[in-house]
Image (tube, coloured by chain):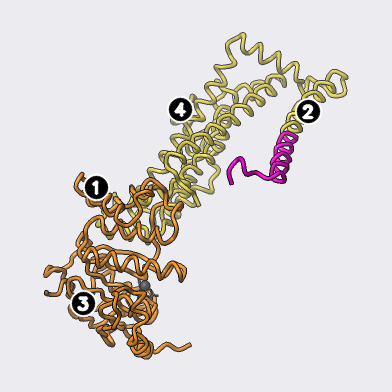
Amino acid sequence: MGAIVEVHNLGMKYHSLNGEITALRDINLEVEEGEFVCIVGPSGCGKSTLLSIIAGLLKPTEGSVFIGGRPVTGPGNQVGYMLQKDYLFEWRTIYENVILGLEITRTLNSHTKEYVLKLLETYGLSEFRDKYPNQLSGGMRQRAALIRTLAVNPQILLLDEAFSALDYQTRLAVEEDIHSIIKQENKTAIMVTHDISESISMADRVVVLTKRPGTIKKIYSIRLTCDRKTPMSCREAPEFRHYFNNIWKDLDIHV
Amino acid sequence: MNSKGISKEHMEYLKKVRMRKTLILVLRLFLLVAVFALWELLARLKLIDPFITSQPSRIAETIARLYREGKLFYHTGITCLETVIGFMLGTTAGTLIAVILWWSELLSKVLEPYLVVLNSLPKIALGPIFIVWIGAGPASIIAIALTISLIVTILEVLNGFVSVDGDKIKLVRTFGANRLQVLTKVVLPSSYPVIINALKVNVGLSWVGVIVGEFLVSKAGLGYLIVYGGQVFQLDLVMTSVLILLIAAALMYQGVVYIEKILVKSGKHSAH
Ligand SMILES: Nc1ncnc2c1ncn2[C@@H]1O[C@H](COP(=O)(O)OP(=O)(O)OP(=O)(O)O)[C@@H](O)[C@H]1O
Ligand SMILES: [Mg+2]
């Protein structure tokens, strides 16, 4: 299996009247198909910037990104993006929200409709398809947001602190949920998080970035001995603490 | 809790709420009747001069006379029509221009100071200019009503557009949305409440524009009747016209509120 996402010597500078900010420098990263990679790093080190560049929303000032061997030039439907909040539109029903991407890419047809309905069915939202977002719980909304992303059938999912707006209990459940959906649908995922535990329990690899300008400090391949491969049970693994302490030290957080 | 499971205390509570509502309604009606009765009484007892203050019975007579002469619906209709056209045009054109300015940031930056300055100009001052340019008729009156609501609509709606959450736009852009799709899928539906609100404000503004326009043009409409009545010292006519104006304006406002309800229901927009 080759790398589906390749990031080569990536650098990003922002220009503003107050001067120039180097957000990212010399980022090299390869993500294999089906892999779950987490990115952690201090606040403002350029994590969101990195995801936006991979998604084609921003042009890097240096280096390049390849997806499936082809350079990224703009947003395309091989990449799905999940943001911190679910951003379900309150004026659309769940079904109408979920097909948003299909409408925009003009790929709404009987085939894709069927796929969406199947996703809603599989992930327990079909009875809510005609409800409005404010009638759903936080966890269900996040699941609906994931289905909206999956509807356009992207190979790669980018998650930017996708669970940080949820309360702790819901968050654990949704982590579990989304992790299993991503694995089940056999997607590649790159997730940004502030939560070290979340990254260790969900990821195959954890990438630690330095303070701004963000560069790669370390990459951990996570190997946990847990029978069921779910984030919840992995938190119980004996190696968990070891990874946690190392990443904590790498992040060098002062309080 | 279902309807059978209502406790006695709760029944009592609901009853109290209903009684209070009825009381308020009765008092409101009473106030209305009382004001008119007092007005009539004072005029009959010659404590006030009906020549200056008019009186309810004379207003009723005036309405009947206007109706017989076929003037009642003619003048009321003209004023209402001008107002409706004025605020519809003002809201539509304002929203369209806001879309254009949203589209071109350069244009909006260039025009910004001019819009602010124009907004502070009392638009009524332009009335005589419109009359010279367009002629003394309904077109000028509509133009005045339109300019009154236009600039403020542009500013309000544009402000609504640019305050749409950037992450919502980012979301549709991740699907590869172009600018037109960003507009139709996110920006316009998000600004729905702002546009409806502009519509409500513009009804009021258009009434002002139309009445002032009719003062200036002085050919037809309730504004004309008011000015004419004042000039020939027929206070009955003035009071009658003001009363009709009051009713028409209130009805139109209720109409807009009703339209809003339908739109909100069909759009299911939980405005925040
Ligand atoms: N549009 C922009 N213009 C100028 N500077 C920007 C812009 N976007 C981000 N930055 C700066 O670039 C740096 C990296 O931003 P980014 O949002 O990628 O960080 P982050 O790691 O996602 O932070 P957080 O953990 O707070 O989400 C920050 O210091 C930010 O101030
Ligand atoms: Mg961020």
The secondary element bearing badge 2 is classed as helix
Classed neighbour count for the residue bearing mark 1: other residues with Cα under 10 Å, few (<14), some (14–19), many (≥20): some
Place residue A230 in its image quadrant. bottom left
Query: For the point 21% across and 77% down, which residue is it?
Result: A62
Does residue A162 sit above or below B148 in this rendering? below
Residue corresponding to mark 1: A113
Return the residue nearer the eye: A36 or B100.
A36
Residue corresponding to mark 3: A62
Does residue B61 sit above or below A214 in this rendering? above
Labelled pair 4, 1 in contact (Cβ < 8 Å): no
User: Would residue A80 be visible to someone looking at this image?
Assistant: yes
Question: Which of label 4 and label 2 is nearer to you?
Answer: 2
From the top left corner, tell me how far across and down residue B252 is, in percent.
Answer: 55, 30
Q: Amino acid at mark 1?
A: Lys
Establish whether labels 4 and 1 are both on one chain. Answer: no
Residue A185 in magenta stretch? no
From the top left corner, tell me how far across and down residue B247 is, in percent.
Answer: 63, 27
Query: For the point 34% across and 74% down, which residue is it?
Result: A231
Q: Which chain is mark 1 on?
A: A
Classed neighbour count for the residue bearing mark 3: other residues with Cα under 10 Å, few (<14), some (14–19), many (≥20): some
- Bounds of the magenta span? B1-24
Report the Cα–Cα distance between label 4 and label 1.
Answer: 51 Å
Report the Cα–Cα distance between label 4 and label 2.
Answer: 38 Å
Report the Cα–Cα distance between label 3 and label 1.
Answer: 40 Å
Return the residue nearer the eye: B176 or B9.
B9
**Ligand 2 closer than 8 Å to the CB at disc 1?**
no
Chain A rendering hue? orange
Establish whether labels 3 and 1 are both on one chain. Answer: yes
Q: Amino acid at mark 3?
A: Glu
Residue corresponding to mark 4: B139
